[in-house]
Amino acid sequence: MEHLVIRDADVVDGTGEDAYRADVVVDDGRIVSIVKEAAAAGCQRPRARRELDAEGLVLSPGFIDMHAHSDLALLRDPDHSAKAAQGVTLEVVGQDGLSYAPVDDRTLAEVRRAITGWNGYGDDVDFDWRSVGGYLDRLDRGIAVNAAYLVPQGTVRALVVGWEDRPATPGELERMRRLVAEGLEQGAVGLSSGLTYTPGMYAGDAELTELCRVVARYGGYYAPHHRSYGAGALEAYAEMVDLARKAGCALHLTHATMNFGVNEGRAPELLALLDEALAGGADLTLDTYPYTPGCTTLVALLPSWAAEGGPEELLRRLADDATAERIRQDLEVTGADGCHGVPVDWDTVEISGVADPALGEFVGRTVLASARLRGEAPWATARRLLLADRLGPTVLQHVGHEENVRAIMRHRVHTGGSDGILTGTKPHPRAYGTFPHYLGRYVRELGVLSLEECVAHLTGRPAARLRLPDRGLVREGYRADLVLFDPATVAAGSTYDVPRTPPTGIPHVLVDGRFVIEDGRRTDVLAGRAVRRTPR
């Protein structure tokens, strides 16, 4: 480990307090000394084997991505510059109720197919684990940045109940409770759900409440992608607040947006609901990304009944003309639950990636635009893609509202989460730009947040939600997960046209006191490890 002094940094410490000038000494992976205003005071300045001149740079804790989809990217891509270059030093994976542990052989194959659009199928990954602890042990072999894991409720349900739309039996519910408990005992920080994704969405509130009671017993938190971000958004948020209250469980609302035309300008209603819950004693936080489009898989928009039985059953239904027409009716006329109860507007659904490169002509166009080029109905194009790519396409949904984005990010329990999907030809730029975009666009250019407030949203506050006793702040004794950035130039390089462009203005990033980004370039350091739940 390096013995390092970072000289004359403007320290923004993650608490929200004003910045201060200091020399910061790092040794053996920790911050061992902070000497404020050393030069001005004329006092003896700390020495180290290596010195870094930070004049003009802000030193802050490393950013914590509270909603990441790097579950396989961490293993397949040791470079992982998509996150390291942004200053991210910790990601929370296992999101939206679907990931790769706990599983058996059957469930693993089903989950790999179901979320191919999030992580790829994983042909280049050795799935040599089946438990949560086994996955965390695999991360401990060395990754670019640290990672924490949420037990995915949909995967647990697939393992115990299958992909059927029915209530769990008492015996099945007890087995799911045991699996959640085992995952938390093995180091998971909480439980996630994807309640517009199958099979997790088949669980009723009573079932979810029982699982959340287990989470509460271990001091974890519940992170639901709730049942609607569209037509029933406010009701869906209220449902989660009430569920967490009944379970006595901490609640973290993931990608807490208000999308689609029905919710334009309605962020204040959401924030009033949250303020009321907080006033009543709720342990509540949320995360957002600083962009208006959403990103998911094309298959996620379909009605849940079409996916009952698993991915292969869904493919069979798509291939049947009569059943495919029922799906179209739900999507285009009724408003499918997978599309948040809103009839789909194919002109807002842009294909961002496909698993089969032969289908690359569809990428970068909306489904409606591709359909017009082909002289066919939009559903015919979407159906063709789903079948040919075996549920692989990812999409951008242009359904957000800037005024909602700004209002929610100002809230006192807000944290940052990229929700970044790293696969596909043209992924959402949030995967490569979320954190510098907060600092460049919403701090420097728009003044929506002050620099100190924003850094607290991205560091200290998420660390508190994760109950990390020694991360998230620039403080003596804390882990040296740190980022140095230029507040005058920091910006996202990623755009919708060139989404994999690295950010600017972030020359140095340290994980556990070691440089993973140095002078703006990725080193070969793999200092990241699994960050396990802190026992109560």
Image (tube, helix red, strand yellow):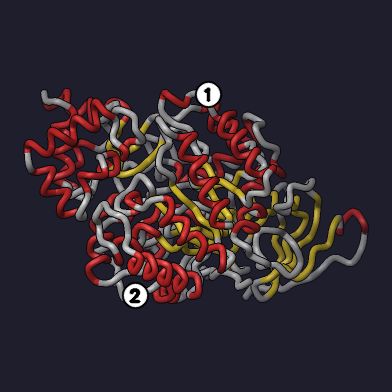
Q: Amino acid at mark 2?
A: Trp
Q: 310 or 143: nearer the eye?
A: 310
Discs 2, 1 touching: Cβ within 8 Å: no
Q: 402 or 34: nearer the eye?
A: 402
Q: 270 or 44: nearer the eye?
A: 270
Q: Quadrant of the C terminus?
A: bottom right
150 horizontally vs 305: left or right: right
Work out how far the residue at label 2 is from the one at label 1, CA to CA, in angstroms.
45 Å
Query: Toward which corner of the image does residue 453 lie, by quadrant?
Result: top right
- Which of pointers 2 and 1 indicates the residue nearer the eye? 1
149 horizontally vs 505: left or right: left
The mark nearer the N terminus, 2 or 1, is 2
Residue at the spot 59% in from the left edge and 48% down from the top edge: 285
Q: Residue furthest front?
A: 170
Q: 348 or 51: nearer the eye?
A: 348
Q: Quadrant of the N terminus?
A: bottom right
Residue at the spot 58% in from the left edge and 55% down from the top edge: 250
Q: Residue furthest right?
A: 42
Look at mark 2 in the image and give the residue it sits on: 129
Mark 2 element type: loop
Look at mark 1 in the image and give the residue it sits on: 265
Query: Toward which corner of the image does residue 170 lie, by quadrant?
Result: bottom left
Residue at the spot 25% in from the left edge and 40% down from the top edge: 302
Q: Is residue 259 above or below residue 101?
A: above
508 horizontally vs 158: left or right: right
Q: Is residue 213 above or below residue 411?
A: below
Q: Amino acid at mark 1?
A: Gly
Residue at the spot 13% in from the left edge and 43% down from the top edge: 318
x, y percentage for residue 393?
25, 44
Mark 1 element type: loop
Give the class, few, some or many, for how many residues have Cα within 10 Å of label 1's Cα (few <14, many ≥20).
some
